[in-house]
Amino acid sequence: MTTPHLAAKPGDIADIVLLPGDPLRAKLIAERFFDNPQCYNEVRGMYGFTGSYKGRRVSVQGTGMGIPSISIYAHELMATYGAKTLVRVGTCGAIQAQVGLRDLVVAQAASTDSSLISTRFKGMSFAPTADFDLLRRAWQSAVSRGFNVHVGNVLSTDTFYDEEPDAWKLWARYNVLALEMEAAGLYTLAARHGARALAVLMVSDSLVTHQKLSPDERQTGFVDMVTAALDAAIAE
C-alpha cells in the first residue's frame, strides 16, 4: 500500500505527523528530536521519518510549498495511512508590529486568497480553523517555556511575489498576524477527514520592519517551534 507520493508501507507512519514544508527540515527534525528515526520516504526528495519523542511514536513528513502541495501529502497521510494529528511547522512573515523575528505564531484560523478552497465549496466561504485542544496545548507549552508566542489569524496566500507590495496591509488592518502558504489547506482537509490539525509557525521576516532571518537561521532556528508542536501533539 503506497501512494503516488509516499513509499511508506502499512504501519510505517505514526498517527501523529509533523509537516514542515522543507524536506531538509524534516530530516533535521528527525535527527534532532526523534529517538531511532527511520526514513520511510524519499520520493521526489520529500523526506519522511518515523521515530519516537518522549516515548510516543511520531512521524515527520516534508510537504513542499503552497496549499496544492500540502493538500496532496495531507490527503494521502490521512486517507491511506490513517494520520489523525497533523501539525504544520514552518515559517511565516509578520504583518503586525508586535510580532517579532523568531516569535511563534499559533494559527487559530487561516484566512486565504486561494481559489482551491473556494472552488471546493462552490464559491461559498469556509472558515478553516485549528483543533482547539492542539492549539491550547501548544500555547501552554510555549508560555511555560518562556517563548514569545502569539495566537490568532494568519493568511495562507498563493502569492509569494505579489505585484502589489502593500496588499498585505488590508489583512493587517483586520488583525491578521502573519502570512504563510499552507495552513488553510491543511485545516480544510483535516476537517473533511475528521482529523486534528494545527500550524505552529516561526517568524522568519517582518513586512512591517523589513527585518529577516538568513537562510541558515531559518533552517536551524526552529527548536522552539518544534518543541511546542511536539508537546501539543503527544499530550493526552
Image: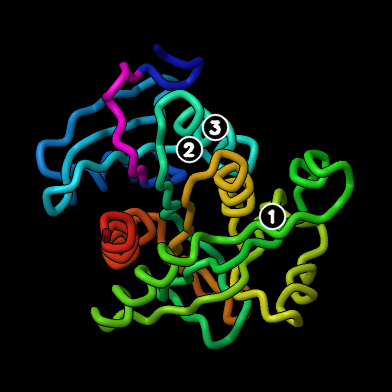
**Left or right placement of residue 177 versus residue 172 in this view:** left
Boundaries of the magenta span: 8-17
Task: Classify mark 3: residues with Cα within 10 Å, few (<14), some (14-19) or many (20+).
Answer: some
Q: Residue flagged by tag 1: what amino acid is it? A: Thr
Magenta span has 222?
no
Color style of the picture: rainbow
Instruction: Please name which of the two marks, 3 or 1, marks the residue nearer to the observer.
Output: 3
Using the rendered view, name the quadrant where residue 206 is placed: bottom right
Name the residue carrying label 3. Answer: 75
Query: Can you give x and y, in whole percent of width and height, for residue 40 in the image?
Result: 28, 24
Q: Which residue is mark 2?
A: 63
Quadrant holding the C terminus: bottom left
CA gap, disc 3 and disc 2: 11 Å
Task: State if disc 2 and disc 3 touch (CB < 8 Å).
Answer: no
The N terminus: image quadrant: top left
Look at the numbered disc 3 and give the secondary structure of its residue. helix
Residue for point 27% across, 25% down = 12
Query: How many marks are shown on the rendered structure?
Result: 3
- Sequence-wise, the earlier of marks 3 and 2 is 2
Looking at the image, is mark 2 or mark 1 earlier in the sequence? 2
Measured as percent of width and height from the top left, residue 168 is found at 73, 70
Task: Determine the residue positioned at 62% across, 41% down.
Answer: 192
